[in-house]
Image: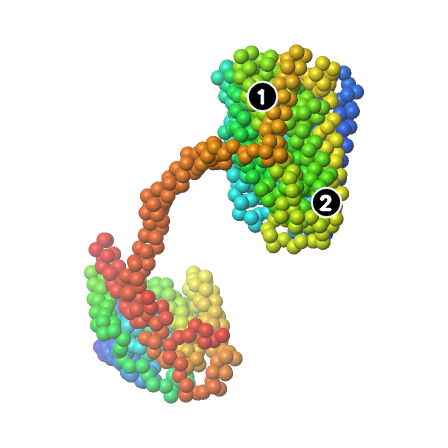
Amino acid sequence: MLGPDPSWYLVVAAILFSIGAFGVLLRRSPLVVLLSIEIMLNGANLALIGFSRVHGDHDGQIFALCVMAVAAAEAVVGLGIIVAMSRRRLTLDVDQFRALRG
Amino acid sequence: MGNFLVWVLWIAAAFACLGSGIAVVSFTNPFYSALALIGNLGSLAVLYLLASAEFLAAAQVLVYAGAVMVMFLFVIGYLGGRADAPFAGGPSWVAVGAVVVSAALLVEIVVVLGLKAGDALTPASDVEAAFGSPAEIGRVFLTDHLLAFEITSIVLLVAAIGGVILGTQTRAEAELDEAGAAQTVDGWRPDAGA
Amino acid sequence: MIQGAWLCLLAPLAGAFAITVMGDSIGRRTAGWIATLAVFAGFGGAVAALVGLLGHGEEEREYVSTAWTWLDTGSFQVGLNLVLDPLSATMMLIVTGVGGLIVLYSVGYMDGDDEERRYFAYMALFVFAMLLLVQGGNFLLLLAGWGLVGLASYLLIGFWHERPEAVAAAKKAFVMNAFGDATMALALFVLVWQTGSLAFAESFAGTEEMSSTALNLVALGLLGGAVAKSAQLPLHTWLPDAMEGPTPVSALIHAATMVTAGVYLICRAHPIFEAAPAIQDLAAGIGALTLVVAGLVALVQTDIKRVIAYSTMSQIGYMFLGAGLGAYGFAMFHLMTHAFFKALLFMAAGVVIHHLAGEQDIRQMGGLRRLMPFTFAAFLIGSLALVGIPPLSGFFSKDGILASALDAGAYGYLLFAAGLLGTLLTGLYTFRLFFVVWGGDPSPLVERHAGGGHGRQSERAASRAHGEPHGGEGPWTMLLPVGILAVLAVVGGWLQIPGVWHEFTHWLEPVAEPLVEPSLGQELLTSSLAVGFGLVGVAVAWLFYGARRREAPDARGVRDVLEHKFYFDELYDLAFYRPAVALSALWRRGIEEPLIGGSITGVTLGARRAGTLVGGAQTGYLRSYALAIGFGVVVLTVVFLAVR
C-alpha cells in the first residue's frame, strides 16, 4: 500500500482519542464537551478504518459508518438538551448541575 | 514518486488533524472550537481516502463536516450572546485528573496496540482498486450487515424525534421567555418546567 | 319432630343474621322484636321436638339427624348432626324458653340504648350458640358451641365498651374460659386418638377399651372446661366481674344457661366420667367447695348483682355436686329450676336497677317494698325458691341433690355436710340482700326516685340521656317475663315430688342412668334438715338486717378475707400475671431491645453512616463522574492486560 503502514493510522487515532477525552474531562461548556466527544468518536473511526485496511475487509468501514450515524444522533440529542437548558435560563456550565451530589 | 507524495500528504493531514483537535479542546470560544472541528473532520477525510475508504471519506465530509457541524454552528449562533464557561474550574483535582487519565489512556492504547496486536497490523493486505468504493460498501451494507443498517436507521429516526421534542418550546418556557430575557436562573430546578 | 330441633337451632341464628344484615334499615325496637320472635320460634321448635319425643317409647327417645359430613379425614368423620334426646330437649326448652323471656325483658330494659341492634344480634347469636352446644351430636359441635357461647358472653359482658371495667371483665371472662376450652380441646384430642371418633355414642362405646390414664385425662380435660365455663373453683373469678354486662345478659348467660353448660357436659359425657371415678369425685368435691366458698363471699358483697352472681356460683356448685355423684336427673332438675328462679332474681334486680337509674349498691337501697310491690313479690318468690322453702321449686331440686349425697357413702356424708352448710349460707345471704333492699324505711336514693322511676336503664355511662319518666315499676315487656318466671319458680319444682312422682329423673333416665337413688326416708330427712338450716339462715338474716335487733358481727380478719373473695384474684395476679409481666419486661430489656431492636437500628444506622461516607464521593460535578469512568477504564485495561 502506498503511504505509511496502518499502525501509523492507529497512532494518530490514539492521540486523537486522548485529546478528545482530555477535552471532555476538562471543559465546562457543554457545547465544547460535545465537540470533544465528536473528536473521540472520530479517533475511534480512524482506528476502525485502519483495522479495515489491515484485514482487507469492509466490516470496519461499516462499523465506522454506524458510528457516524450514532454520532449524528448524539449530536442532535445533545444539542437539543443544550437548547432546552438555555431556554430555561440555566447557565451553560456542567459544574452547575450538581443536584446529584451526595 | 507517488509514494513520496502520499507520505507528504499523509503527514500533513495527520498533523492538521491533531492540531485542529487540540484547537477544539483549547479554544475558549465554542464558535472557534466548532470551526476547528470542521478542519479536524476534513483532514480526517484525507486520511480516510489514503486508507482506501473512499465512501467513508465522502460521508465524513457530507454528513459530518456538512450537516452535523452546520447544526452545531447554528446552535452556537443561537446561544451566541452568552458568556462561555471557563476552560477549567471546579475542584482542582478534576483538572489534574483529566490530564492524568487522558495521558494514561493514550499510553494504554499505544501499549495495547503495540504489544498485543503490533505483529498482526503490518503489513497491510493487498486490496483491489474497488475496495471501499460506494458500490462495495453498499453491497456489503445491504447484504451482510442489513440488520446493522436497519438499526442505524431506527436510531436516527429516534434521535430526530428526540430532537424535535427537546427543541419544542413548552408553554411554561414561553412564559419564562416573556417574563424576562435577561433573568438567569442558576442551578437546576426539577419543577421548573411544570 | 327432628324438624322442630332444626328450627330450634336455626331460628335464633336467622334472627341474629337478619338483625346484622338489616342494620340501620330497621328500628332499634324492631331489632328487639326480631330477636324475641326468633328465640320464641326456637321455643316452638323445641316444644314440637318435645311432643315428638313424648310420642315415642322411652327407649326410642334418641334421634341423631345429620345434615352433612363436614369433616372427612380418612377414618375420622364429623358430621353436622344434632342429637335429640330427653337431655337435649330439656336444655333446648330451658334455653329458648327462659332465653325468650329474657330477650323480651331486654326489649324494655335496653330501650333507649344507642346500640340496641348490636345487643339483640349478640343475644340471638348467644342463643344459637347455646343451642348448638346442647344439640350438637358430637363433641366437636359441642366444642364449637362451647367456644361460641364464650364469644357471645365476651361480646355481651363488654357490650358497654366505653366502660373500662366492662372491657376488662370481658377480657377476664374470655381468658378464663379459653383456659377451659383448651383443656377441653386437649381432652378431645386424646379421645380422638383413643377412640377414633367424636360422636357421642361411638366415643362412649370406645371408652371401654381405653386405659385408665387416658380416661382420667379425658375426664379431667372435660372437667376443666366445665369448671371454667360454670365458674367453679378455681376458675370462678370471671363470673362476678361479668356482672359489668347488662342485667338481662347476667340473667340469661351468667345465671340461667351458659354457666350451667358444665353441668350439661358432665351429664352428657357421663360414661366417660363414670369410667373415671376419681375425676367424678373431684367434680363433686369442687362443687361442694364452690358452694360453700361462694356462699361465704356472697355474705359481704354490696353490689346487688354480685350477690346474685355468687349465689349462682354456689347453686352451680350444688349441680356439680349432684352430677359428680351421678345424680344426673337431680342435677339437671336443679339446673332447670335454678334457671327459673335465678333469672327471676336477676330480672327483678334489673327492674330495681332500672328504677333507680343504674344504682347497684345495696347500701343505697332500702324500703323499696311499698314502692314496687310487684317486683317485691317476685323477688320474694325468687328468694324463697333459692333458699329452698317448700313448695317452691328450689326445695325439690336442691333437696334431691342433697339426698343423693346421703346415698353415696362416706364421701357423700362430707358432701352432704357441705351442702347443708350451703343451705344455711344461702338463707343468710339471700335474705340479707332481701331485707337490705326491700325492708326498712326508704333510703334517700329511693325517695328521690319515688315519683315514678326514670324508666331508663342507666347502668351505662352517667351521660346517657334520660328519657321520659313513666309511672309504675317498668314497661310491660319487663314485668311480664318477671311474672311468668315467678309462676315457673313456684310450680317448676312440682315435676318431681319425693314419694309421689319422679317425672323429671324418670324422663332423663334413658340418657343418663343415675348412679344413686335416694330412698324416701333419705329424702324426707334431707328435706327437713335443709329447710331447717335454710330457715335458720333466714332467721339470722332477719335478726341482723330485717329487724335490725342486733349489729351484724364484724370480725375484722374474716371480713377482710371475704371481701377479698378469699384472695383468688390477688393470688392469680401474684402467680401468673406478675411473673408474666416481669418475664416480659426481662425479655424486652434483655433480648428485644438490645438484640432485635438493636439489630434493626444498627442496620439503619450502619447504612446511614456508610451512605454518608460514600456520599462524599458524589460531588455532583459531572466531570468528576466522567473522570471516574475514565479512571475505571484505565484500571480495567490494566487488569485485562495483566490477567491475559
Quadrant of the rendered image containing residue C136: top right
Nearest the eye: C565 or C158: C565
Is residue C547 in sight in this rendering? yes
Residue at numbered disc 2: C474
Residue C311 at x, y percent in the picture: 59, 31
Residue at (26, 77) in percent of width and height: B89
Quadrant of the rendered image containing residue C314: top right
Residue at numbered disc 1: C420
Is residue B139 in sight in this rendering? no
Q: Is residue C407 left or right of residue C61?
A: left
Quadrant of the drawing holding the N terminus of chain B: bottom left
Residue at (41, 88) in percent of width and height: B182
Residue type pointed to by label 2: Gly
Lower sequence index among marks 2 and 1: 1
Q: Is residue C642 left or right of residue C517?
A: left
Residue B78 at x, y percent in the picture: 41, 85
Q: How many marks?
A: 2
Residue at (53, 12) in percent of width and height: C410
Q: Confirm or deny contact between disc 2 and disc 1 (CB under 8 A).
A: no
Q: Is residue C366 left or right of residue C241?
A: right
| Mark 1 secondary-structure assignment | helix
Q: Chain of mark 1?
A: C
Residue type pointed to by label 1: Leu
* Colour style of the rendered protein structure: rainbow
Q: Is residue C228 above or below residue C212?
A: below
